[in-house]
Image (cartoon, coloured by chain):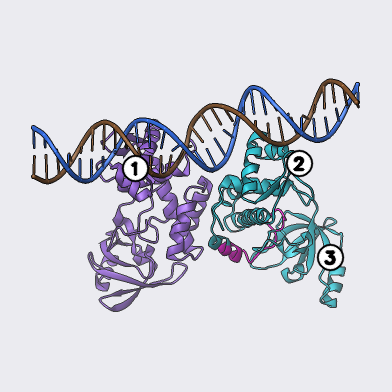
Chain colours: A purple, B cyan, C blue, D brown
Amino acid sequence: MRMLSQAVEDYLKAIYKLQGDGRVATNDIAQVMEVSSASVTNMLKRLTKMELVDHASYKGVRLTGAGTKVALEIIRHHRLLETYLKEIMGFSWSEMHAEAERLEHHISEEFEERIDEMLGFPTHDPHGHPIPTKDGQIADSATQTLAEVEPGERVVVHHVSDADSDLLEYLEGAGLLPNSRVHVVEKEPFNGPITVAMDGAERVIGREVASHVFVAHERPFEAGA
Amino acid sequence: MRMLSQAVEDYLKAIYKLQGDGRVATNDIAQVMEVSSASVTNMLKRLTKMELVDHASYKGVRLTGAGTKVALEIIRHHRLLETYLKEIMGFSWSEMHAEAERLEHHISEEFEERIDEMLGFPTHDPHGHPIPTKDGQIADSATQTLAEVEPGERVVVHHVSDADSDLLEYLEGAGLLPNSRVHVVEKEPFNGPITVAMDGAERVIGREVASHVFVAHERPFEAGA
DNA sequence: TTCTTTTTTTAGACGCGACTAATCTTTATA
DNA sequence: TATAAAGATTAGTCGCGTCTAAAAAAAGAA
């Protein structure tokens, strides 16, 4: 794995985020990166030579397999860092993002593994965004469980684990059915119970039970990422 | 505080370490930085313009007050990071140094404060090197107490707190007198007792008592710093 | 379709931080 | 003290990543 500059990593990350199914426009990259279009064109030439992007003059750009891999690594770093800074180090929402934005380029594989482990291999960051795995897989947005949601977050139940029919009945009784809106009020530490509010009424449920309730965020994408 | 490049920070750190009482030679900087002498001369010109060093052609270089301040900040980052990586994150000695070497340039004031606090405001890093304070003070090498020494380290008792005569008598009975060599064998977590070896015999002492025994390392300066 | 507007690229420049080769200065040695 | 060796600086180049101004290509409107 060759050494890439921070600038290169930032461009790849920006292109990844702009890239839906199609190709990305030079001007769009210039805007989110806050540089001139000429700078972007210049960089795209270099990225093309490095085979990280596929750029055709006047036709937009797209990440190659290698480029996508790098972008996902950086995004993984970012989201793991945000989770770590918030959960373990007590950073605020605003400080968290800026710090992760810088550190994501400078942590080692080793560091990444340690924080992943210390966090219990989380699948989503504090915003609810999925954390790419080491081999570049991104969890489906509905693979986050209620047990992982942070206090203050509002989520919608997506589906419920169908392993145990007793459990299903309990969840049904508790009103934790697909499409119900849930507001996580409090979380006891050390895998203790979770207090949720549904239709204004509070309810305390065990962490174990919560880990069988798969949820989605109400607003999948927002400002910071 | 203006933004400095990583290169500038690295030069200042190198000069700080080479600088005893006198001035530092271009070639010496080139050697530790692993760059050509011409590159050093070139950088010294820029550092002089920034008023971070005081450089006279053919006469060596010396840090200014501002330059020293920056160097100490970076060294503080490095030593706090090494301590954090080792104590909290479980890094090995070898990984610790390399990681701190990169991260020292990229952590915020906020991050620095958090890890300082999480570590209980340590005065020395795991090597036993003093950690500069935020305002650039460096603890005397003999202000580290036995309570702060890591298992495996060998230290020499420098002096003993003279607050309490009962304590002094206890320490005398335990053989913890100035110039005695002490090998820390084990440390119980959560401020539990410490096992030390002296003249081959092991002895268990309370953490509170150990915090009144001021020690110095046998080899004040070694490879990594 | 032709003209206009928007988007993108090219051309040329600049600061940073490195390099090599050549040219001083200073220091050491005969 | 003259000369050789060691140390430091200058001169000139290069790649990175940015910029502005100008030209070219694509897209939209009359």
Is D30 left, or right, of A162 in this rendering?
left
Instruction: Say which residue label 1 marks.
Output: A37
Instruction: Say which residue label 3 marks.
Output: B159
Residue C23: quarter of image: top right
SS at circle 2? loop
Work out which residue is located at the far bottom of the displayed protein and give it: A201
Is A82 left, or right, of A201 in this rendering?
right
Q: Are marks 2 and 1 in contact (CB under 8 Å)?
A: no
The label number, if any, that marks residue B38 in the structure image? none
Under mark 1, the amino acid is Ser
SS at circle 3? strand
Q: Chain of mark 3?
A: B
Residue, x 78% and y 52% (percent of image)? Answer: B220
Instruction: Kindly report which numbered mark, 2 or 1, lies closer to the viewer in this rendering.
Output: 2
Task: Tell me where the magenta segment starts and ends, as one range.
Answer: B113-130
Residue, x 26% and y 69% (percent of image)? Answer: A181
Q: Dot 3 surroundings within 10 Å: few (below 14), some, or many (20 or more)?
A: some
The label number, if any, that marks residue B59 in the structure image? 2
